[in-house]
Image (cartoon, helix red, strand yellow):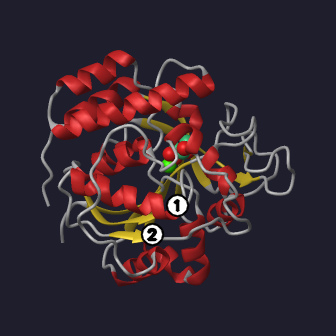
């Protein structure tokens, strides 16, 4: 039995999803069993292709990529993609060549279920997009819960405003019904919210230092950050660049990266003004059992250095 943590990354690349994949591929303590994709930052045909071409670019040919749900559980994607932030194909900016490795035929949800059922060790799920695939897997096969070590999610905002509405963060807003299912599943959930991801930012100087490392993966990550930083400046007026999704991988590499507190959390689905909001019972007024850990503090410098150190490493199977 290997002492690497087994993980499945469920993502919608997306610049920060792509960096999460690259970070995981360079982590000595993680074994990526597969990458599953979902509609979110862009349509599914784009997100699945982006996952594959990023991995191929970084010479990670042996990690399989699966196509998942093409729209949220209760509605169509109806232009609710992250195109304004990530570009029309979800990965604007660098010219990453087309994929050479084929996409797997099996559906992402079936891969997640089969892999969890067949594994002799518990597996950590890392969803960095809308929670559609994970909720569908939990509905189709509730027994898989027993083999989930934890679910480390990028999503939500508790102490800070949202980034798609004032109440909601993008991933949860795109599929709030799915998020509600996941939070009420009884799984061991760690939620990395905007509260920490908007603090673990890259400044222009960090991006230049990364580029200066000179290897092909560091350079492409710097180019991804150039684009992401420019859309954050145009759209949100901020002069720094978050890398939200990569924190979910980072905390599995070094658990001192993020501090959490345990709470009961639910997702607003019915009110148009707050739809997609992650509402935490911080003062315990509901009397409900806690159901997740929410992020409260992050070590930005540790994260930036972790990205520097890992991107220059070659991929080892
Ligand atoms: C989340 O939304 C997406 O745009 C990013 O990839 C990240 O997962 C941040 O709100
Ligand atoms: Ca994402």
Left or right of residue 29, residue 21 in this image: right
Q: Considering depth in this image, is 58 or 157 the residue closer to the camera?
A: 58
Q: Quadrant of residue 283?
A: top right
Left or right of residue 253, residue 262 in this image: right
Q: Considering depth in this image, is 152 or 264 the residue closer to the camera?
A: 152
Determine whether the residue tagged by mark 1 lies in a helix, strand or loop: loop
Q: Residue at x 18, y 66 (%)?
A: 2
The mark that comes first in sequence, 1 or 2, is 2
Other-residue count near label 2 (Cα within 10 Å), few / some / many at <14 / 14–19 / ≥20: some
Cβ of mark 2 under 8 Å from ligand 2: the answer is no
Q: CA gap, disc 1 to disc 2? A: 8 Å
* Residue 43 against residue 16 in the figure, above or below: below
The quadrant of the picture occupied by the C terminus is: bottom left
* Residue 280 against residue 60 in the figure, above or below: above
Left or right of residue 227, residue 290 in this image: right
Q: Residue at x 12, y 55 (%)?
A: 316
| Disc 1 + disc 2, Cβ < 8 Å | yes
Q: Residue tagged by mark 2?
A: 148
Q: Residue at x 23, y 49 (%)?
A: 27
Q: Considering depth in this image, is 83 or 73 the residue closer to the camera?
A: 83
Q: Which mark is residue 51?
A: none
Q: Position of residue 91 (x, y in %)?
A: 43, 45
Q: Residue tagged by mark 1?
A: 188
The quadrant of the picture occupied by the N terminus is: bottom left
Q: Residue at x 39, y 28 (%)?
A: 226
Look at the image and tell me whether residue 47 can be seen: yes
Left or right of residue 263, residue 9 in this image: left
Determine whether the residue tagged by mark 2 lies in a helix, strand or loop: strand
Look at the image and tell me whether residue 193 can be seen: no
Q: Position of residue 262 (x, y in %)?
A: 60, 46
């Amino acid at each position: 039995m290997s002492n690497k943590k087994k993980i499945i990354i469920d993502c919608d690349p997306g610049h920060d999803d792509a960096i999460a994949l690259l970070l995981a591929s360079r982590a000595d303590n993680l074994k990526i069993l597969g990458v599953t994709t979902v509609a979110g930052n862009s349509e599914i045909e784009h997100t699945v292709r982006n996952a594959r071409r990023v991995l191929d670019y970084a010479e990670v040919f042996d990690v399989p990529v699966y196509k998942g749900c093409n729209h949220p559980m209760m509605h169509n994607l109806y232009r609710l993609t992250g195109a304004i932030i990530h570009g029309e194909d979800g990965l604007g900016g660098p010219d990453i060549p087309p994929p050479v490795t084929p996409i797997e035929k099996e559906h992402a949800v079936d891969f997640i279920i089969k892999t969890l059922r067949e594994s002799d060790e518990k597996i950590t799920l890392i969803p960095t997009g809308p929670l559609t695939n994970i909720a569908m897997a939990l509905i189709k096969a509730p027994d898989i819960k027993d083999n989930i070590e934890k679910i480390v999610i990028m999503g939500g905002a508790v102490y800070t405003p949202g980034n798609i509405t004032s109440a909601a963060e993008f991933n949860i807003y795109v599929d709030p019904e799915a998020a509600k299912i996941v939070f009420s599943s009884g799984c061991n959930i760690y939620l990395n919210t905007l509260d920490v991801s908007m603090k673990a930012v890259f400044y222009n100087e960090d991006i230049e230092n990364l580029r200066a490392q000179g290897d092909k993966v560091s350079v492409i990550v710097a180019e991804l950050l150039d684009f992401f930083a420019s859309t954050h400046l145009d759209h949100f007026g901020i002069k720094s660049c978050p890398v939200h999704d990569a924190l979910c991988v980072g905390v599995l590499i070094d658990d001192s990266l993020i501090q959490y507190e345990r709470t009961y959390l639910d997702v607003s689905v019915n009110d148009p003004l707050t739809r997609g909001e992650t509402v935490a019972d911080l003062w315990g007024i509901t009397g409900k059992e806690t159901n997740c850990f929410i992020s409260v503090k992050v070590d930005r410098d540790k994260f930036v250095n972790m990205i520097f150190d890992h991107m220059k490493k070659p991929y080892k199977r």
